[in-house]
Image (cartoon, rainbow, N blue to C red):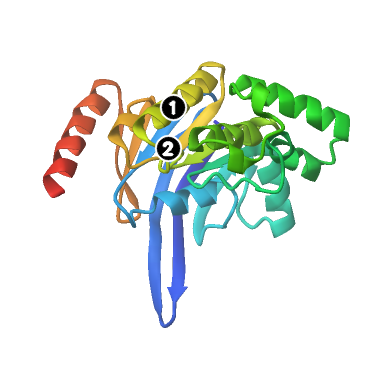
């Protein structure tokens, strides 16, 4: 099991008050799986993603990433584990505008201490994989939103992480460009890349094999197969009715 979490909680102090972002969440992700996490704003989706990505520690509960118990690890150990095991794709791309496309992709390899020639070789291979081989010397400001997200995906995958965490990866893109990015993610998963994606978009969630529905910091339902299709239809209708 690549990801296994048991009764995970996360509580934040807000002045004199405490806010429970996660309330005893338990679930697992197998290697090669493709999981979408859905839910309304404030349901705990992003908090869960941050904990799984080792960007934060839970208040209580246990989390194993590829067999390693994350609980109680130092910040340095978390950083090392994150760099070795996890690739991130964010809604806002988070590219460095002063660097070229290939240099942006190289960044995680710099932190790993990979030599210059090897970094360039691996980065070019990954850019070719996402269809941007001819844009490697451009700056992010010279690219479209979809191209920037492809660069972000290449950067996330250049270290060959065990899991790709995608937080609203098409949130800043138009429908056609968003669909193009989903095709990239689908292709990566078909090649064995494990993907955990947060999305509010029903159409994007349909690409996953499983959908985890969250509500008020807890998992309300987990769906696969025909059950997934049925609930997604209901979710779509209820979302339209609330607009």
Say if 40 sits above or below 127 in the image: below
Q: Are marks 1 and 2 in contact (CB under 8 Å)?
A: yes
- Residue 112: give x, y in percent of width and height: 80, 41
Q: Nearer the viewer, residue 127 or 79?
A: 127
> Is residue 23 found left or right of 65 in the rendered image?
left
Residue at 56%, 37% in the rendered image: 148
Residue at 72%, 52% in the rendered image: 77
- Dot 1 or dot 2: first in sequence order is 2
* Residue topped by disc 2: 170
Residue at 60%, 54% in the rendered image: 71
- Residue 1: give x, y in percent of width and height: 54, 31
- Residue 58: give x, y in percent of width and height: 52, 57
Q: Secondary structure at mark 2?
A: loop
> Is residue 135 found left or right of 181 in the rendered image?
right
Q: Secondary structure at mark 1?
A: helix
> Is residue 174 found left or right of 233 in the rendered image?
right
Disc number placed over residue 182 in the picture, else none: 1
> Is residue 112 found left or right of 152 in the rendered image?
right
Residue at the outermost left position: 241
> Can you see residue 130?
yes
| Snapshot quadrant of residue 124 | top right
């Amino acid at each position: 099991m690549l990801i296994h979490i048991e009764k995970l909680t996360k509580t934040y102090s807000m002045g004199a008050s405490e806010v429970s972002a996660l309330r005893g969440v338990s679930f697992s992700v197998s290697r090669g799986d493709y999981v979408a996490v859905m839910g309304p704003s404030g349901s705990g989706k992003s908090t869960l993603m941050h904990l799984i990505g080792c960007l934060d520690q839970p208040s209580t509960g246990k989390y194993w990433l590829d067999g390693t118990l994350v609980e109680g690890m130092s910040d340095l150990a978390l950083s090392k584990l994150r760099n070795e095991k996890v690739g991130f794709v964010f809604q806002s791309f988070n590219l460095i505008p002063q660097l070229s496309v290939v240099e942006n992709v190289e960044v995680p390899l710099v932190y790993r201490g990979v030599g210059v020639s090897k970094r360039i070789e691996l980065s070019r291979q990954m850019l070719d994989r996402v269809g941007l081989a001819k844009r490697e010397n451009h700056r992010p400001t010279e690219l479209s939103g979809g191209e920037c997200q492809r660069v972000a995906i290449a950067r996330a995958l250049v270290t060959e992480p065990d899991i790709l965490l995608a937080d609203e990866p098409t949130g800043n893109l138009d429908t056609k460009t968003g669909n193009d990015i989903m095709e990239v993610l689908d292709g990566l998963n078909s090649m064995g890349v494990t993907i955990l994606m947060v999305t509010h978009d029903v159409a994007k969630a349909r690409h996953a094999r499983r959908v985890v529905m969250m509500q008020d910091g807890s998992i309300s339902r987990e769906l696969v197969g025909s059950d997934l299709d049925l609930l997604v239809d209901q979710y779509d209708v209820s979302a339209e009715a609330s607009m």
